[in-house]
Amino acid sequence: MMLQGHTVDAVLLAELRDSSSMLYNVWLYFRGITAPLFFSVSGFLMGFLLSDRYGEKYKALLKKNLYRGCLLIIIGYVLRINISALYNFGDLSNPGFRYFLSTHVLHIIGVAVLLIALVHLLFSNRKHNKLLTLFFVAAGGIAFYIELEAQAGLFDSLPLYLSNYFSKDGGSVFIVFPWIGYSFFGVALGRFYQNLKTDVSINLEYYGLSLSLILINLATIANLFAEITSVDIGNYATHYLWRYSWLGYSLLILCLFLLIEKKKNINQYLQKIGSKTLAIFVIHELVLFGSVSGYGLAKLYKQSLSWSESLLLALLVIFLSLFFAFLPSAIKKINNKSS
């Protein structure tokens, strides 16, 4: 979803972005759900893996995640470097340098991974298991709420390299709030799933699907409540609760994947692709957006293609990203066989 969403958004003709078109609205929905799903699933996997591990294996996994969080942030900055804008690179008046300081999805995922690992490090005792799950639920809600405060200029006094993590004014695409909230909720769901998955009396996927439908319709329920009681809920239903709707859609898709996961022949392919997620993301950034070089397919075909041409180009980007992501392991496998 991420690859096709980025590709089509970059190259589709402006006049074809018609809100009355069913095709455009379907595509826009899947593009919108990509980021919440990405953050939610990353948190879910961390919560799932960390919830029942203690001792040396637990510490080793935490160290690995601390390293991974730092690596994601570093790679995020590397992908923001533009060789053609290296002149006066440290000058804030240089657009290329300001672009380098702005944050994208890898920066925020990296921050989320670091914070999740640090919280688990601080509360590593088994007796904190249930408390940690509740903590991440509360932290997710707080992260969604703080977004409103961030928009009110709460972090404007920070230096640009820090304020970019909390405000889009400096050119950031993704910022800490609200996106880190999806990862926190994902951790809570992952921990909950790990702790109850062996209880055959509980159909977790059924309860997950039910919860997802409630979250999806939360804003509608709030508006209905406001109409009945004449209570003014301000912008909560249109903005704050909207975040929970996307969380509901993410949970819905996650539950469907968990049902698919039970089919081992499908699961092994999902695991292989999942293990190459970072490589696929980096390669698609290089191919599509020309990260580092400044020249990519998005610049070459900027908003100039029809739907069919855009979708064909999206398939090409997906193929190239998967091909180069799996190429090193394929070469290694061939060399091992020949030796």
Image (spheres, rainbow, N blue to C red):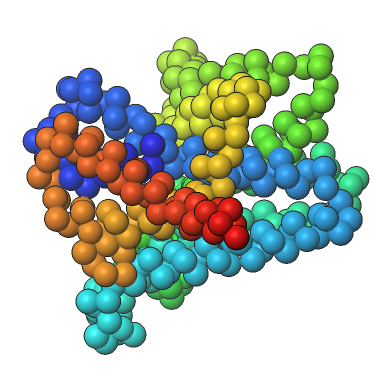
Which residue sits furthest front?
338
Residue 166, x across and y down, in percent: 45, 60
Q: Residue 77 in the image: x percent, y percent?
A: 42, 69
| Quadrant for the N terminus in the image | top left
Give the residue at x 34% y 56%: 285
Q: Is residue 216 left or right of residue 50?
A: left
User: What quarter of the picture does the C terminus occupy?
Assistant: bottom right
Q: Is residue 312 above or below residue 69?
A: above
Residue 132 placed where, x, y %? 77, 45
The correct choice, above or below, for 276 with respect to 264 in the image is: below
* Residue 73 placement, left or right of 65: left
The quarter holding residue 282 reads bottom left
In this view of the protein, which residue sits in the foreground, 244 or 336?
336
What residue lies at 86% left-to-right and 59% top-to-bottom?
Answer: 56
The residue that appears at 82% across and 39% down in the rendered structure is 130
| Residue 71 image-quadrant placement | bottom right
Task: Using residue 224 as the reference point, say whether residue 110 is left or right of it.
Answer: right
Residue 162 in view of the camera: yes
Res. 150 in view: no
Residue at figure coordinates x 27%, y 43% from the top left: 316
Quick one: 192 or 322, which is closer to the camera? 322
Whole-percent x, y for residue 190 in the image:
69, 37
